Amino acid sequence: ERSDERSAHRNGHYERKLHTGAGEVKLKVPKLRGASFETQIIERYRRRESSVEESLVEMYLAGVSVRRIEDITEALWGARVSPSTVSDLNQKIYERIEAWRQRPLRSRYVYAFMDGLWLKRSWGGEMENVSVLVAIGVNEHGFREVLGVVEGMSESKDSWLELLKNLYSRGLEKIDLTVSDKSKGLVEALPEIYPASKWQRCLFHFHRNVLAKVSHSKKATAAAMLKAIHAQESAEAATRKAMEVADALESMKLASAAAVLREGISESVTYYRFPRKHHR
């Protein structure tokens, strides 16, 4: 219907293809004369469903070659995706990842868990180990949030400084308690950026360090003894219990395990300074 109140009118349609998880479909897109048409269901100029694009990106990031992606898409959806399409999609996702990595942070997180993950990647046709440093924060409301992810060739002090400086530059000024394994690089770097943050040695890693000095036949007994240490009601009681356990380990001819326990117990009870309901 044409009238003085209308700014445009329908003018037929044009066809275009859309790649979906169920295969390729043909759409008849309405054309307007005097205005552009945009549907609420499918974005203008879009050629693939979001699920298809996400699958392409995931395949590439998982190490599937572009040539192999072409073969897979043809087998799954009946249409080949060109290398330039995969490249364009990855460029978009890298921009989104970088924006997320550099987003502003709260000025304070009560707790921060930090660790290095060792992964294998293909680089120049060869496989090599790479360290990915991760920081996870817990805010005042008890919610966890990934704060930062930085790739480093090792868990060195310089690598950890890079991550901590990144967090600080994005607005994170205070961490009440940092939890990590006894990574020498992190332990040395933390006071330089967050001198007021207390440090707690991760109990899982600490127990594993002790049990590494225990023979297989005695591991179950030693593990139960270690668990009893951190079931105490206070840091003082936990320290006393640790000394008793160390004596018991020595009587079991496990002097090396006892030495690791005595050396590290003071680093593993810092969390007692914080509310009991947070301990778990």
Image (spheres, grey):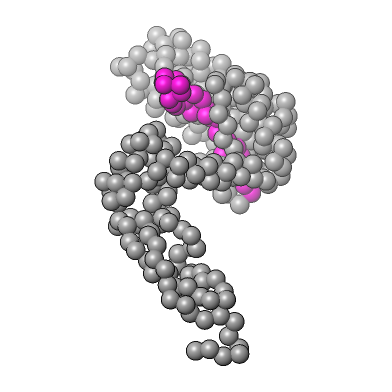
Locate residue 37, reporting x and y percent: 51, 71
Is residue 173 or residue 97 the one in the foreground? 97
Majority secondary structure of the magenta segment? strand
Locate residue 121, reporting x and y percent: 44, 26
Locate residue 230, reporting x and y percent: 50, 31
Residue 221 in sight from this viewpoint: yes
Which residue is situated farthest in the left direction here?
Answer: 75
Is residue 44 or residue 220 the one in the foreground? 44
Residue name at image x 47 percent, y 77 percent: 11
Q: Quadrant of residue 13?
A: bottom left
| Left or right: 99 as drawn, with respect to 241 | right
Residue name at image x 37 percent, y 46 percent: 81
Residue name at image x 59 percent, y 37 percent: 148
Q: Quadrant of residue 182?
A: top right
The vertical placement of 141 against 216, above or below, is below
Counting every numbered tag in the picture gives 0
| Left or right: 10 as drawn, with respect to 138 | left
Magenta stretch: residue 57 in it?
A: no
Locate residue 193, reporting x and y percent: 72, 29
Residue 272 in sight from this viewpoint: no
The vertical placement of 35 against 161, above or below, is below
Magenta part of the protein: which range? 111-140
Residue name at image x 42 percent, y 13 percent: 213
Magenta stretch: residue 118 in it?
A: yes
